Amino acid sequence: MVVVGLFVIVGVFIWRFPPVRIITRTHAAAQAAARAFDAGRFVTEFWTNQLLPACNRAADVHALVELLRTNPPEAEKKYARKFGLGQKWYFFVCGQAKVLSVDGGEILLCVDGDGKPEVKVECGPVFGNTVRDGCGLLDVSQFPNSQDFNMISLEINRRIEAEVLPRLASNMPGAVVKFAGCTEIDPSEPELLPLKVIPVWVEP
Amino acid sequence: MCLSTLTGVMVVYLLGCKKSDTGTDSGRKAPEQKPRIAVVISTLNNPWFVVLAETAKARAEELGYAATIFDSQNDTAKEAAHFENIIAGGYKAILFNPTDANSSIANVRKAKNAGIPVFCIDREINATDAAVSQILSDNYTGAMLIGQYFVKVVGTNAKYAELLGLVGDNNTWNRSRGFHSVVDRYPALKMVAQQSADFDRAKALQVMEAILQAHPDLDAVFCGNDAMAMGAYQALVAAGKDKQVKVFGFDGAEDVIRLIAEGKIMATGMQFPRTMARMAAEFAHEYMQGRRDYPQKVPVPVELVTQENVHKFVPYGRKDEVSQSAPKPNAAN
């Protein structure tokens, strides 16, 4: 009687607190997917809620170009961001420019009316973290796994290639455009201009 | 008389005792114990990590600590045992190069709960609330730069293989994904093999031999670290294909920098183990002096080393990297 009672107690205990749980592979995969970082979804929300509204607060590209010509350390002090121990300067800029030329590889823009290109936009694939690190809106320390942080760049770059570059490239030479974007420069290079900008917003 | 004699003996005895005690204090004073710092490294079976470990140890000693290096031999069980011993041994801080981004979290938490600050170097853990700070190479961007150079020198119509590092390490995937963020954009650039060689030179040699058997028409190989690049290069030399297959590494280790200068290896990504190790030791020192405001992650740039610019570099760093003290991280990050 006592033995039967013990079996019942042990049985109930194991039923309530099973030492092993068996789940299907499909269920395990679904759980892992639910936990996984969705970079596409993150960037969709980031783009609309943070990046585009921040374009209005970006540095004036004309003012930055003038400072880079006359006083680069002041340009760094006033407008630059840096990433970790890196020495490169990142800028988030906006402004108006005249399209000087559009060919397959690049678009040249003039921001000060002198007819010379101060901004260059490459039309091919967008690589790297210029926008992620240059906009100043994302902090690597908020991401436990740096792979997630890197996937954000990939998604941002895809979006720029699909939506922003074709819009800019559709303008003819002589057209006046408004734009916002990010750029990085190596201050040890002898020539700091033209700025190689990756646009995130263009009008028209 | 008797009482006064006894009193006199007692006074002499007490004076004697006092003198004796004083003598012991001044003559045989125990040496003051230096606070201890542990340097826990994923493996010392790779010269790059030896540089990382020894620089961290040397900088900690310069700052007035007794430092000991622990080798985890890429084994999470060994790493856990080291942490148990370190906690029991009364160490004041841990400079930590984790073996596994997920499995190593528990060790860091154990140390944190025991009041021992942990500073990760080079490799991260997938948690932002365990280590005091993590000083990490920007592997993704470094591998992206290699990817761009790879396309430039190999072309957009070629066959290549990839040797991955430890599959549990985030650096493995950050490098692989950084590289693929570029090369995958060129459909005629075909990856015919992708295998792990655990960041190990001997394993890379074996893996590369097997890949060459299956794909004798290979054009290039991207290796997730320089030890594997050396193993792959060794296999290519043995097979007589070292002129046919272009080798790309990652780290900036001595052998590879020499072979790039000799025109035998195409490129690598220069990490800065000395900078990272010095900074971790300095962070630990500042922590013990009361500092608490650390960035959780400090990314350290990786620079592309090619046959064109190799003259600017030495093994494990730049020629102009002369500062003995680590640079301060930028406040924004």
Image: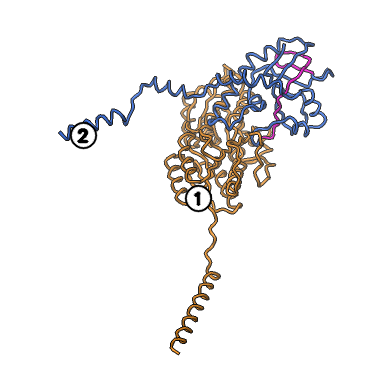
Chain colours: A blue, B orange
Q: Nearer the viewer, residue A133 or B148?
A: A133
Residue in the picture at 64% in, 13% down:
A163
Most common SS among magenta residues: strand
Q: Is residue A189 left or right of residue A12?
A: right
Mark 2 is on which residue type? Leu
The residue carrying mark 1 is: B91
User: Could you tell me residue A182's position as x and y percent?
Assistant: 69, 23
Q: Which residues are magenta?
A: A86-110
Between the residue at mark 1 and the residue at mark 2, the CA separation in whole angstroms equals 48 Å
Q: Would you identify the image quadrant in which residue A164 lies?
A: top right
- Give the label on residue B294, or none: none
Mark 1 is on which residue type? Tyr
Q: Nearer the viewer, residue A35 or B276?
A: A35
**Number of numbered markers:** 2
Q: Residues within 10 Å of mark 1 (few under 14, many from 20)?
A: many
User: Could you tell me residue B180's position as x and y percent?
Assistant: 56, 24
Q: Is residue A181 left or right of residue B91?
A: right
Q: Is residue B264 left or right of residue B232?
A: right
**Magenta region includes residue A90:** yes
Image quarter (top left, top right, bottom left or bottom right) of the C terminus of chain A: top right
The residue carrying mark 2 is: A6
In the displayed structure, would residue A174 be above or below residue A146?
Answer: above
Q: Is residue B18 visible?
A: yes
Image quarter (top left, top right, bottom left or bottom right) of the N terminus of chain A: top left
Q: Considering the numbered disc 2 on the image, is that residue within a helix, a strand or a loop?
A: helix
Subunit under mark 2? A
Q: Nearer the viewer, residue B179 or A51?
A: A51
**Magenta region includes residue B244:** no
Q: Are marks 1 and 2 on the same chain?
A: no
State the residue lying farthest toward the right.
A114
- Tell me whether the residue at label 1 lies in contact with that at label 2, contact meaning CB atoms closer than 8 angstroms: no
